[in-house]
Image (cartoon, grey):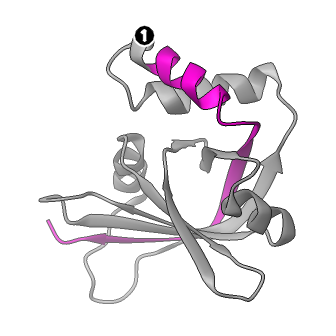
Amino acid sequence: MSIDMAGDTPVMTEAQIAAFLDAPHHAIVATNRRDGAPQISPVWYLYEDGKVYFGVRVASAKYLNLRRDPRISLCIDGGHLDIRTIMIYGNAEVVEAESPWSEDLVWRITRRYYDTDEGARAFREKARAWGPSALIVVTPEKILSQDFN
């Protein structure tokens, strides 16, 4: 994996990137449609051990696109008043079989976006009704950062 530190755009160090990705921002995920056009959508994610994890519904465009073409891009933006951004480029692995490992990751992804275990559990119950899901594991090949704060 490479981390772009070149150019005159203010960038973050590896430690700053990891700290930024540790906060519960939304990631905008871009996959490749069959016709080559990008398909984008927001996801909740977890960044851990140099990888990005997020869940998708098996019926979603993201899932179908990644089964066909594992190339993926993510943009994580700090939001209003936090003008930092991370762009991640790499390949995704689709993990379909539920296991204690994948269930734990999905729980930790959900939990980081809720203030309480109760709220996270309620969301997980609701999400199960939406149909089968899979875990996506992104191995970054390149990370770009911008820090205009």
Q: Quadrant of residue 144?
A: bottom left
- The picture places residue 39, in percent across and down from the top left corner, at 59, 74
Residue placed at 25% from the left, 76% from the top?
A: 10
Residue drawn at 18 percent across, 71 percent down: 148
Q: Is residue 24 inside the magenta stretch?
A: no
The amino acid type, in three-letter code, at marker 1 is: Glu
Q: Is residue 2 visible?
A: no
- Looking at the rendered structure, the number of numbered marks drawn on it comes to 1
Horizontal side of 40 relative to 133 (left or right) equals left
Percent x, y for residue 23? 35, 41
- Left-right relation of 67 to 115: right
Residue 94 horizontal/vertical position (percent): 80, 51
From the viewer's side, name the closer residue of 66 and 149: 66
Residue 31 location, quadrant: bottom right
Q: Indicate whether 136 appears above or below 142.
A: above
Q: Is residue 145 above or below residue 82?
A: below
Image point (69%, 45%), residue name: 57
Task: Give the vertical position of 86 relative to 121 (above or below).
Answer: below
Q: Residues within 10 Å of mark 1 (few under 14, many from 20)?
A: few
Residues in magenta, as a range: 120-149
Let me know if residue 8 appears in the view. yes
Residue at the far front in the pictured view: 129
Residue 92 versus residue 147: which sits nearer the camera? 92
Snapshot quadrant of residue 55: top right
Quadrant of image for the C terminus = bottom left
Identify the residue at image location x=66%, y=27%: 128
In the current view of this chain or complex, which residue is farthest to the top? Answer: 118
Q: Nearer the viewer, residue 76 or 7?
A: 76
Q: Which residue is mark 1?
A: 118
Q: Quadrant of the N terminus?
A: bottom right
Mark 1 secondary-structure assignment:
helix
